[in-house]
Amino acid sequence: MPDGKKKKMDKIVSLCKRRGFIFQSSEIYGGIGGFWDYGPLGVELKRNIKDVWWRDMVTGHDDTSTPVGAATPYEMVGIDASIVMHPQVWKASGHYDLFHDMLVDCRTCKARFRADQIPTSPCSRKPSKHPGEHTDCDLTEPREFNLMFKTFIGALIDPTAEAYLRPETAQGIFVNFKNVLSTARVKLPFGIAQIGKAFRNEITPRNYTFRSREFEQMEIEFFCSPDSSQGWYDYWCARRFTWYTSLGLKSERLRLRDHAASERAHYSCGTADIEYAFPFLAEGEFGELEGVSHRGDFDLRSHMEGKLVRDGDILKVELDEHGRASHAGSGKDLSYFDDATQTKFIPHVIEPSAGVDRAMLAFLCEAYTEDAIPDDKGVPQERVVLKLHPRIAPVKVAVFPLIKKDGMPEIAGEIYRELKLKWNVSYDQKGSIGRRYRRQDESGTPFCITVDHQTLIDGTVTLRDRNTTVQERVNSANLVSLIEERL
Ligand code: GAP
């Protein structure tokens, strides 16, 4: 990683700790690799990202009209499925057999590496080298390692009680397809959305929260007729790309990259990744934020018939040595009857699958800015500011009394309580006003309101804009409508 980029990433990590966005999990015990805790500001930012996604994709979506670029109106509904599901789900979906990384062990130092990352992984011993480069390194051949976390249901710890923490939220949607179809009375095309935790026993969690072992996904399974599926795939690629730009990611640091056939997951007949140029990557490299996949009828068919294997373009049920399905499906009919054409078919699926933690990391990296602003005497002072989009900013407004007397705290308290009915608002009366502004700049708060001597005379306050630091005097009676307009 170039020096400048590393420095920027180190500063972002330090800001996240200092301001309470992200902490290492179990830090007082030395931490635990691949797990992260979100602090008071982090939890607000993460919640806002999820809320904005849900609002934009589900509740704010107009079921009756055609969105820009879409072929027909469509409906969107949500679910919240359990994390531990019937183990057969993962056998039919292919995760039990196929969701693995190829690993290499070192017999000398007992460390384990992903086979595809050997040239970039550090060996744990000194001097710093890559695995295989010390004279006594003794690497095994690559071996398969399943990424699903195993657990046991009930008191028995034996194979009959084995279950898994879900590695993706998607399967909870597929197994509920019929339930949603019959209860929500939706018709094709329609989408089912879900936000929730997913777990993967990643071999080399790295790059801060980018590759974690516990993370959250925001997934949509969009069901449509086979002949319209390519159009919907194009629609979702464009729709999801513009969602990120609408929240502040610059298009020059984003790209939509089509997967080569060899790179696609076992279920996919077309995938494009939305990728971001994270500062921890080398110049010209991008990291995946979201995958948009054309899953065909793979998932619903697998849950009907059993584990499928791909033979060129054709999907077949995988058979064992006795000619039976290697992993049986549910045997339930998950097909769809189309009233208009009087035909029955298994819907095709387009899946925009986003990571909450990766989106949050990208928004933080994009927002991190260093600039210089003049102090009271006009001398430029360096500052760090998080220019987060107001929709996702953890705190929307901070209210300060200039000093802790002359009735200013009381007026500021009233304003705070009034604004708090609408937004997450912070109140601060500690330290110099300059320091209070700086603290809010680092937290990404778009507006600061200060009650000062003039307020006591005419009821006006100063309203400061985070990005420009421009302060204007406004009537405190108009604050709600003014801020509403600007947010
Ligand atoms: N249902 C499809 C699916 O899960 P994926 O590409 O494996 O596809 C989707 O995951 C998204 O989940 C990724 O684009 C990424 O944002 C997020 N994600 C996957 N693995 C992750 C990890 N180890 N840590 C953080 N986020 C992860």
Image: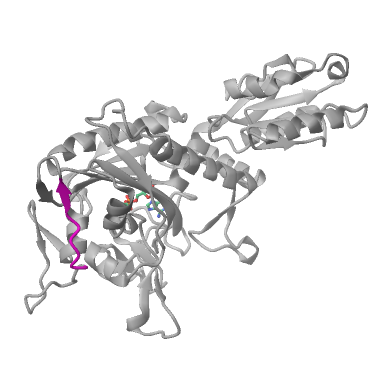
**Residue at left offset 44%, top offset 54%:** 196
38 and 135: which one is in front?
38
Quarter of the image holding residue 410?
top right
Q: Quadrant of the C terminus?
A: top right
Magenta highlight: main SS: loop
**Residue at left offset 75%, top offset 33%:** 416
Is 173 drawn above or below residue 282 in the view shown?
A: below
Decide if residue 187 is on the left or right side of residue 353: left
Decide if residue 420 is on the left or right side of residue 144: right
- The extreme right residue here reads 406
Q: How is the image coloured?
A: one colour
Is 458 drawn above or below residue 175 in the view shown?
A: above
36 and 415: which one is in front?
415
- Location of residue 417 in the rendering, given as x and y in whole percent from the top left corner: 74, 35
292 and 112: which one is in front?
292
Is 57 drawn above or below residue 99 in the view shown?
A: above
- Location of residue 185 in the rendering, given as x and y in whole percent from the top left corner: 29, 47
Is residue 447 visible in the rendered image? The answer is yes
Quarter of the image holding residue 359?
top left
Decide if residue 246 is on the left or right side of residue 318: right
The number of discs equals 0
**Residue at left offset 23%, top offset 53%:** 265
Q: Is residue 352 magenta?
A: no
- Location of residue 476 in the rendering, given as x and y in whole percent from the top left corner: 75, 20
5 and 446: which one is in front?
446
- Location of residue 431 in the rendering, given as x and y in whole percent from the top left corner: 82, 35
Decide if residue 279 is on the left or right side of residue 449: left
Q: Which residues are magenta?
A: 330-338
Q: Quadrant of the N terminus?
A: top left
